[in-house]
Amino acid sequence: MRSPINRLPKFIAFCAMVWLGTNPTLAQKSVPEFHQILSEKSAFDQADFAALEQGQTVVRLLPTLDKREVAVGGFIGLKVAADVFLKSFRESMTQKSNPAILEIGRFSDMPILSDLQTLSIEDRDLEDLKACVVGDCKIKLSAIMIERLHKEVDWEATDYRPQAAQLLKRMLLDYVHDYVARGDSALIKYHDKPVEIRLAEEHRELMSAPGYANNLLSEFQQNLKVTTVPQVSLVENAIVWSKIKFGLKPVLAVNHIMIYKRSAESGPQILVASKQIYANHYFDSSLALTAFVSVPGGSPGSYLLYENRSRADGLEGPFSKIKRGIVEDRAVSGLKGILESSKANLNADTLSRTESGQLPDKGWRQWTIGRVHVFFWLLLIPAFIALFALGNYGWKGSLSGGAQQ
């Protein structure tokens, strides 16, 4: 006879399956229930739901607990299936589908230096590294990285630029390799400013903030860990780097992209999480989550929800309230435009295929590249809407002059 101790793990797994199966976030069986959960988790109200039912896009600011943080959420109705959305996003992940995407690449499962072969380091960044010291650097780096630059680059040599560029790539590779091996415990500690920013702590705070998608991420991850037959599968797990043209400086960002799929005909079916694990300018941390949800009886029946929380060092200091106001306005209007473009393009794709019974004339691959860059902007480089505002207004210059541009 098996002892109670031997039966305990199975009992715990059974309880976890029951809890996950009955949890209201995972099992939205009606539109009213869906609305209630959004009201409780993300502070959307009846006016928002009425606008959604009329085909409008709903975007609002979310509460924050940190003065560096901007949080925005939004959702739209769609007339597409979950698999269509999933296929579109996965095919877009490393495609240079927008002029602002200067360079892009994906790390191998076991990262190697050639993964960064097409990455170029800006000359201005290399020059800034000459005067870089711990606590005062124009590039976001850890104290160890800054010390390596002093020790391993001969700044008096004629070839100091290629030396520094190669070392930056090696350090970035070492960092990503360590993150793959150890997870969040390996996340960088930025020490470009007097106060050190610990990215692991930043992400714990971002992930613990209230929100529909945040809650969903925890549930999906828990389902994978504790159940013997999980409903959720991890269908994509990738680390992607990209160099984006925005504002005053191009930004090199590295994001960990995780795509979860739930085997169900209704409720949350797809969840895409984009965790920024490095950015060389502006951002201290960023987390973006998108959920594709099907609700029986709804009109149109499927919804795309987006939540983003980002912390930027430019939101501190003088004129912080004015800067925050400008960034928040841009974040709301920019996200609304992105969601509306996503809706129009995805719905048009589905309608075209339904009416013709075949793929659009211009070809599936070309069509995909033309429409899914919206999702790249939406998820891969989270909150660059805020970066756009920060860059354009040049906070080190005249704030009043910038605000009139």
Image: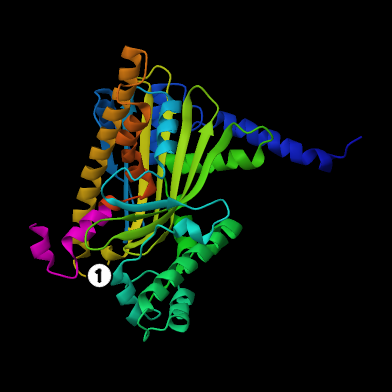
Q: Residue at x 25, y 56 (%)?
A: 246
- 140 or 196, nearer to the observer: 140
When asked about the image quadrant of residue 278, the answer is bottom left
Give coordinates of residue 358: x percent, y percent.
Answer: 37, 16
* Residue 43 in view (yes/no): no
Q: Quadrant of the C terminus?
A: bottom left
- Against 261, residue 186 (above or below) is below
Give coordinates of residue 216: x percent, y percent.
Answer: 48, 39
- Give the farthest residue toward the front: 158
Secondary element under disc 1, as helix, strand or loop, is loop
Dominant SS of magenta comes to: helix
- 158 or 182, nearer to the observer: 158
Q: Residue at x 30, y 21 (%)?
A: 361
Span shown in magenta:
386-405
Q: Residue at x 25, y 25 (%)?
A: 55
Q: Which residue is mark 1?
A: 317
